[in-house]
Image (spheres, grey):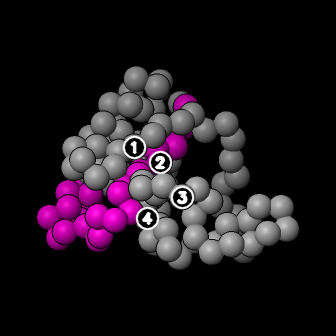
Amino acid sequence: MAQYAILIFDNAEAGDYTPEQQAASQRHADDLVDSGAMIAAYALRSADTATSLRGDVVTDGPFIDSKEVIAGVCVIEAPDLDAALDLARRNPAVQWGRGGVEVRPVAGGIAPIAR
């Protein structure tokens, strides 16, 4: 089965999720786990904690200055792009009007290494 990365975008100025939004996000994650599609998921700290590298230059903040920033990422398995889009469409971030999601096929990866 193919793997897809779902990049979750949010409006950087919108602030933290409300308790209701946090609960909706958790329900969506639980649904992905229960369906067997979830491979991994990570929420990211706010963009103001980012450090970017460009050649030898290190700067504070995200790589691109934008109203929307990547708030999290998950990797799912789905039989095809249409199925991946269906799963991504259920992400509450799509309905809140604060951001959205981007779905990309995963070209390759490295499984976690036990140390």
Residue type at mark 1: give it. Val
Instruction: Measure how far apart labels 1 and 4 are at the Cα level.
Output: 13 Å
User: Label 2 belongs to which residue?
Assistant: 7
Instruction: Measure how far apart labels 1 and 3 are at the Cα level.
Output: 18 Å
Residue 65, disc = 3
Instruction: Measure how far apart labels 4 and 2 are at the Cα level.
Output: 10 Å
For the residue pair 17 and 29, the one nearer the viewer reads as 17
Q: Could you tell me residue 95's position as x and y percent? A: 22, 44
Residue type at mark 2: give it. Leu
89 is higher (above) or lower (below) than 31: above
Magenta residue check for 40: no
Q: How many labels, in total?
A: 4
Q: Residue at x 69, y 41 (%)?
A: 108
Viewer-side label of 1, 3:
3
Q: Residue at x 45, y 40 (%)?
A: 102
Instruction: Measure how far apart labels 4 and 3 are at the Cα level.
Output: 20 Å
Among numbered discs 1 and 3, the one appearing first in the sequence:
3
Q: Could you tell me residue 6's position as x and y percent? A: 46, 44
Among numbered discs 3 and 2, the one appearing first in the sequence:
2
85 is higher (above) or lower (below) than 100: above
- Range of magenta residues: 2-27
Q: Could you tell me residue 110's position as x and y percent? A: 70, 52
Q: Are marks 1 and 2 in contact (CB under 8 Å)?
A: yes
